[in-house]
Amino acid sequence: MILDFPRTQPDHDEEHYEEVSPPAPRRRRTGGAFFVDHGFDLAGAAIAAVSVMVLLDRLTALSGLIGLFLVAYVAFLIVFGVLVSLREDSLAVRDAVMTVFLSSAALIAFAALGNVIIYTVWRGYPALHHLNFFDQDMSRSQPTQASDLAIGGVSHALVGTLWQIGIALVLAVPLGIVCAVYLDQTRSRFAGFVRTVVNAMTAFPSILAGLFIYAFWILTLGFQFSGLAAGLALSIMMLPYIIRTSDLVLRLVPAGLRESSDALGAPRWRTMWHVVLPTARSGLATGVILGAARGIGEASPVLLTAGFTTYMNANPLQGPMVSLPLEALKLVQSGIPGWAERGYATAALLLVVILVLFVIARVIGGFGPGHLSRRQRRRVERVSARTLVRITSSPGRDLAPARRAR
Amino acid sequence: MVPPPVGEAPPVKRRRVRAVLGTGDRIFRHGHRLSAVLVVAVIGAVGLFLGVKAYPALIVAKLHFFTTQAWEPDAHRFGVGGILPDTIFIALVALAVSIPISLGLALFISEIAPRRIQRILISLVDLMAAVPSVVYALWGFNYLQGHTIGVSRFLSTWFGWIPIFKVAGPSSASILGSANAYTASTFIVGLTVSLMVIPIQCSVMREAFSQAPLGEREGAYALGGNRWGMIRTVVLPFGRGGVIGGTMLGMGRALGETIAVYLIISPVYTVNSHILETGGNSISALIATLFSDSSKFGTSALMAAGLTLFALSLVINFGASAIVARSRSGAES
């Protein structure tokens, strides 16, 4: 779903085949030419739409910015359709209008994303450029002097997030990957069942993971609110996601590699450990990183299991421990001016963390299965050189004596 | 049956080939099988434990749990009769906004965007999915809310005769009335949640669309269709399973969304079908609001609500994955 590997298609060299038989063009057509062809129509429609918007704004106190945009957008589509119909038939008009409509859907979605990110950073900026925001906790910032941004920060939430996601990863990654190995190795009915359950659980409401840990760990077993409890909840939330992505990645490993390893007489576990998992390494890492990004951003399981505190607490076993998303939520919810800014700053910090993880995942994931970095390649070459030496230096094992005997 | 003639060899039985596993392989096999059992056990434990904890409350409330529109567990008057419909209203609003946008976005990426920017757009959609829900929630709470009131007011003034757009209260009578009747509404929450749902729906739909076979596409062009004609007759029918499955996955996500609802809405426990009007609720927001100051019985009642949500989202997710898997486009994922 999220993972995207380049599907390589063999590119035929068209020139050589031209006379023999025309090879099918294996490129699907997509088009940006549309926007060039219809440039004037688009510009005209846009001018008309803006005029309608301005006119409406002057004439009526209609309904705020979004309402105006909606009206202007409809006007834009109509005018554009009319303009195209001056030159072309109704089918072409429908094609042009739908193309513009689909493109604008994309525009709306990305504009909303940009709006969210810019708004968060803009609101958080006043607090972000104070260094104390990163190395103090909130215990000294009282509501009465909340607007003093030079006192207090969210270091406790940062530490909390690190602990919680660390615990969650330690639990969920081995279990998840081994479970994906199971799905890869077995074709039984139970494997199908596991896969169905896991797929159904990937969109499972995260608050239920929190509720489960709250009911089980805190109410029944009697432990405190703690970072450990939050880590447990996050691991339950992340587990299906990690299994699903790992499962998809393991299926991409070429069967030829496994079969070669099997044919050399390697036991199953050696094939898995030395061939399949290293080949899928980049994909597995991508899945884990994106899973971690998801876990870091999730506030609701933490809300139910970690409690809330303004103090630094570096012990995940005891006492409430807040995380970045929860801190952002609580600070903005308080509605106190200085704290709300810090809430947005926390959200911006969270965004930066997610973005960094996302870029790392992209870079690693872009390699595709089997890709080796330069260092990894050197290591593999060293190992094979050693193996070669071992094979050639033990005369009992190679074929030379047999040939001599004949 | 004719007995085999004497002197001929009896028919050769097919030999059963059995691999002999070494110790390492036996450990390996048991290990990964154990982990799968463990995963299923953990997931099962979540449902089971919610059920066990919810039992005391469900025994008291019986079937009235699904009809009562109140939440006073200590007075034994509680139920999801109001909250469950409100949860579904939020999800429906989110879907009404997100389906056209994600469908358009998916078609744009797979059919219209030039190849060069296709990958960038896919990355952007993935980034949109990776943005934490709390960030969307904060944006919806402080930014979107202020900008949406105008739309709400417009809809309720001119389309108030449609039941869901009606807003009770004095302010709806005039365009210049107070804005307070429109804040913290199901509509605003639904808009916020739609942003979280769009990337999920879009990636499932895009995956389905991009697998539409080249031959059929070219066939549509060869018959004289233009691009929209090709999309309408080839890509959309081919990707129908992806569209339905993606929509349902998005709905599952929208039903379970906690933080946005918890932050924005002003909770009520009755059915509020006027989506533009202040007040609404969802099961997950109910749990987030009340878990800390509930009595033992109150917690049990919350577990019952959580169990309802669990069952609902399982049904929807199973349905979604079944539809995606059965469709022509989704056989492999």
Image (spheres, coloured by chain):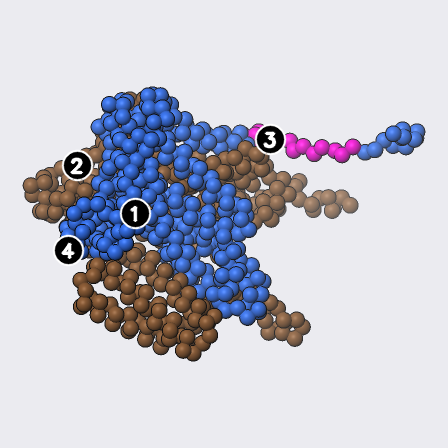
Amino acid type at mark 3:
Gly
> Are tags 4 and 1 found on a single chain?
yes
Mark seen at residue B22 = 3
> Is residue A242 one of those drawn in magenta?
no
How would you rate the neighbour count of disc 3 (Cα within 10 Å): few for under 14, some for 14-19, many for 20 or more?
A: few
x, y percent for residue A222: 28, 22
Between the residue at mark 3 and the residue at mark 1, the CA separation in whole angstroms equals 70 Å
Quarter holding the C terminus of chain A? top right
Parent chain of label 1: B
Q: CA distance from mark 3 to mark 2?
A: 56 Å
Q: Nearer the viewer, mark 4 or mark 2?
A: 4
Q: Amino acid at mark 1?
A: Pro
Which chain, by letter, is brown?
Answer: A
Q: Nearer the viewer, residue A184 or B278?
A: B278
Where residue A332 sits in the image (x, y, percent)?
18, 44
Q: Quadrant for residue B157, please give it.
A: bottom left
Residue A255 position, x and y percent, is 59, 47
**Rendered image: mark on residue B163:** 1
Can you tell which quarter of the image residue A69 is in? bottom left
* Chain in blue in the render: B
What residue is drawn where x is 19% and y is 64%? A60
Q: Is residue B24 highlighted in magenta?
A: yes
Residue type at tag 4: Leu
Give the structural element (helix, strand or loop) at label 2: loop
Q: Amino acid at mark 2?
A: Thr
